[in-house]
């Protein structure tokens, strides 16, 4: 499904995520705004609605599908709910704790397994935490690290198959330090003998379709979205920023994306 990495930048963090999808899935749309008052920016999944990543000043949320060696039975098709609806429901939260409290109140049994990565950026702190829904129980959010760098990976073939991406991230980090150039090189990395498990991946039925970059501080959030064409050709970035204004009261409508203002 995707690879996500986070590195520290001056005053905040830089998150990059590769989205791996079926070749037949419709192309996402960017930019769209999510949450109360359209306060967050992200791409829109035109097939299922919602999004897999969104950012606003002070907060990033990124969702990874989760596929274990023994996946649970899927929800009844007539009752199934897209995981893409999660982030629009949570991105208006005050921070990670409030976001995960809201997550626990969602109708999770109607959703397939996932991990939700949250990054909270304050004037004097950065906090990163992960929650896991395995199809039966929600694992309480775990503070992953006090601060980035960090990488996560998942695959529709089974998450275990692509965990080799994480030592590759660690090796590149050790060699070059946590720089944007290193991070970009990681998200474009390929093993010549293993395109199907590469970070910029390709296999007969699926491939990396986009690379999303979010730069977030306590007061700003800017997102760059790059479409990846067949053959690994990466297009020029489209750029949008999130509104820097007080959050509106109340929860966002489930899975609703507002127009670009």
Image (spheres, rainbow, N blue to C red):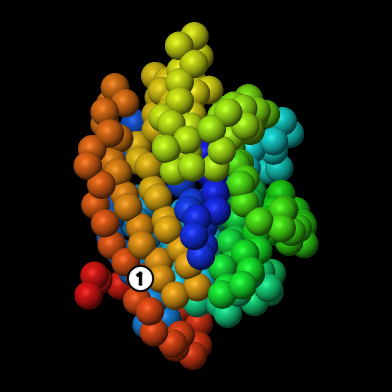
| Residue 140, image quadrant | bottom right
Residue at 72% across / 30% down in the picture?
Answer: 69
Which class describes the residues within 10 Å of circle 1: few (<14), some (14-19), or many (20+)?
A: many
| Residue 48, image quadrant | bottom left
Residue at 62% across / 64% down in the picture?
Answer: 126
Residue at 71% across / 49% down in the picture?
Answer: 134
Q: Is residue 96 visible?
A: yes
Residue 238 is left or right of residue 79, and the answer is: left
Q: Where residue 209 appears, x then y in whole percent?
A: 35, 37
Q: Where residue 105 appears, x then y in whole percent?
A: 66, 73
The one nearer the camera, 217 or 241, is 217
| Residue 172, image quadrant | top right
Residue 5 is left or right of residue 241, and the answer is: right
In this picture, is 245 found above or below 239? below
Q: Secondary structure at mark 1?
A: loop
In this picture, is 179 found above or below 55? above
In this picture, is 107 found above or below 22? below
Residue at 45% across / 21% down in the picture?
Answer: 190
Q: Where residue 51 appears, x then y in whole percent?
A: 42, 57
The one nearer the camera, 175 or 259, is 175
Work out which quarter of the rendered image holds the C terminus and state it: bottom left
């Amino acid at each position: 499904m995707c690879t996500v990495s986070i590195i520290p930048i001056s005053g905040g963090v830089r998150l990059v995520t590769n989205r791996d999808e079926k070749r037949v899935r419709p192309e996402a749309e960017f930019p769209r705004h999510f949450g109360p008052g359209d306060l967050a920016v992200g791409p829109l999944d035109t097939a299922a609605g919602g999004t897999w990543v969104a950012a606003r000043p002070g907060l990033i949320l990124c969702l990874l599908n989760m596929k274990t060696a023994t996946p649970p039975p899927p929800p009844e098709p007539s009752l199934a709910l897209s995981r893409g609806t999660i982030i629009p429901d949570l991105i208006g939260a005050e921070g990670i704790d409030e976001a995960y409290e809201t997550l626990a109140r969602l109708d999770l049994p109607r959703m397939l397994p996932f991990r939700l990565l949250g990054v909270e950026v304050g004037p004097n702190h950065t906090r990163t935490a992960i929650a896991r829904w395995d199809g039966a129980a929600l694992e309480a959010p775990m503070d992953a690290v006090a601060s980035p760098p960090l990488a996560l990976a998942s695959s529709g073939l089974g998450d275990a198959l692509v965990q080799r991406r994480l030592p590759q991230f660690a090796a590149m980090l050790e060699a070059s330090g946590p720089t944007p150039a290193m991070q970009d090189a990681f998200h474009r990395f390929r093993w010549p003998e293993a395109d199907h498990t590469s970070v910029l991946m390709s296999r007969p039925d699926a491939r990396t379709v986009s690379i999303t970059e979010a730069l977030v501080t306590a007061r700003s959030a800017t997102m760059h979205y790059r479409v990846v064409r067949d053959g690994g050709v990466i297009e020029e970035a489209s750029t949008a920023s999130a509104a820097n204004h007080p959050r509106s009261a109340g929860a966002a409508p489930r899975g609703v994306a507002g127009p670009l203002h």
